[in-house]
Structures are given as structure tokens and as C-alpha cells.
Amino acid sequence: MNRTILLMIFILVSCQKETKNLAPKDKNGNRIFYNEIQILEYSQNEYINGKKVDYIIIDTSCLSQKKKAIADIENNNLTYFAAPTFEFDEIAPLLRKYNLKTEPYLSSCLVFGRFGKNCYEKEMIEEVNRRYGEKFFDSIRNVARKNYIIKHPNERLRENGRDVADIYK
């Protein structure tokens, strides 16, 4: 008898849908999601207790990254983000003369989830291009390519169907 009662209590307790760990709500009753983990947990089941869940997204990660980028920009702590191509290592010493750090950056047009990606990098790229202009970086890239070709004369590099060394002769 005791086992039956305990089994019934266990079944009743385990079958109840837990709602105490749900995302908080705004003043209109919409769920608020601050990170991808929360939204993944709840967006898989848009219905909770038979009701459609309305939600808003507050991308605190992107906001924090932008805030850090703005602080770095205000302190003239600029970083040039570029694809890690063959001349990437040659770019760093050239940009150091202008107090610019270099970091590799791979972007994608694919967006996973509903939160911003690479917000720090995007903010920094925009500011660096605004201050120096894209032509500046094109010329730096050309000098870096020439330096790379001089240091690696036996290496055959192809770009757009042409040998890169032929472009800079």
C-alpha cells in the first residue's frame, strides 16, 4: 500500500511541467531571453502549458562586445581584423607603425541563432576603416604581398587564376 501511494505521488510530481525556471517576463507578459542557451531551451517548444509563448530578445553579449569596442576606440586601442591569408603575417609589422594591432578574422554570411556575432570585430572594423580608409589597407596589403613574395620566392601562390608573383613584378 505504501509503495503504491509513493508511486502515485512520484508519477504526479514527475508529470507536472516545471515552469519555475522559465525566462523572466516583461511588463507585457513576453518572455525575455538574454542568451542563446535560454532561447534554445524555450524556442524548441513555443507552447508552454498549451499557450503560445511571446518573447523578446535582448542581446546582452553583443551589447557588451560593442561597449568594449567603443571603450577601446576611445582609448585609441585599435585592432585591424583581416582574413588570415598568406600575407597576413607581413601586415602586422606594417600596421604596428600606425599603432594598430592585427587579429585574424573569419566572418560568415550564415547566422546561427538570433543573436549577433562578432559585434566587437564589426564595430572595430567600421572605426578603423573610417579613420584610415579602405584604400590605406589596400596599399598596406599590397606592400605585405610584395614582402611575402620577396621572402618566399620559390612558393607559387595563385589568386584569381594568376600567379601572385606576376601581379607584383
Image (spheres, helix red, strand yellow):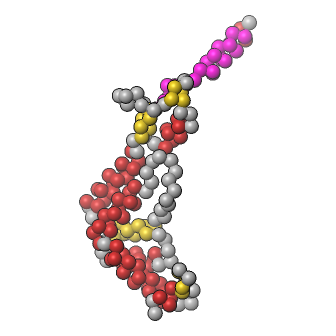
The majority secondary structure of the magenta stretch comes to helix
The reply, left or right, for residue 25 in relation to residue 21 is left
Which quadrant of the rendered structure holds the N terminus? top right
Residue 22 is situated, as x and y percent measured from the top left of the image, at 49, 30
Residue in view at x 36 percent, y 48 percent: 63
Q: Is residue 126 magenta?
A: no
Classify 67 as above or below 134: above
Outermost residue toward the top?
1
Classify 40 as above or below 151: above
Question: How many numbered marks appear?
Answer: 0
Residue in view at x 50 percent, y 89 percent: 165
Residue 88 is situated, as x and y percent measured from the top left of the image, at 46, 75
Q: Is residue 76 visible?
A: yes
Classify 14 as above or below 80: above
Residue 103 is situated, as x and y percent measured from the top left of the image, at 42, 67
Q: Quadrant of residue 132?
A: bottom left
Outermost residue toward the left?
74
Classify 31 as above or below 113: above
The reply, left or right, for residue 96 in relation to residue 38 is left
Residue in view at x 49 percent, y 71 percent: 84
Q: Is residue 77 visible?
A: no
Magenta-highlighted residues: 4-23
Residue in view at x 51 percent, y 29 percent: 52
Q: Is residue 21 magenta?
A: yes
Residue 62 is situated, as x and y percent measured from the top left of the image, at 39, 50
Q: Nearer the viewer, residue 29 or 145?
A: 29
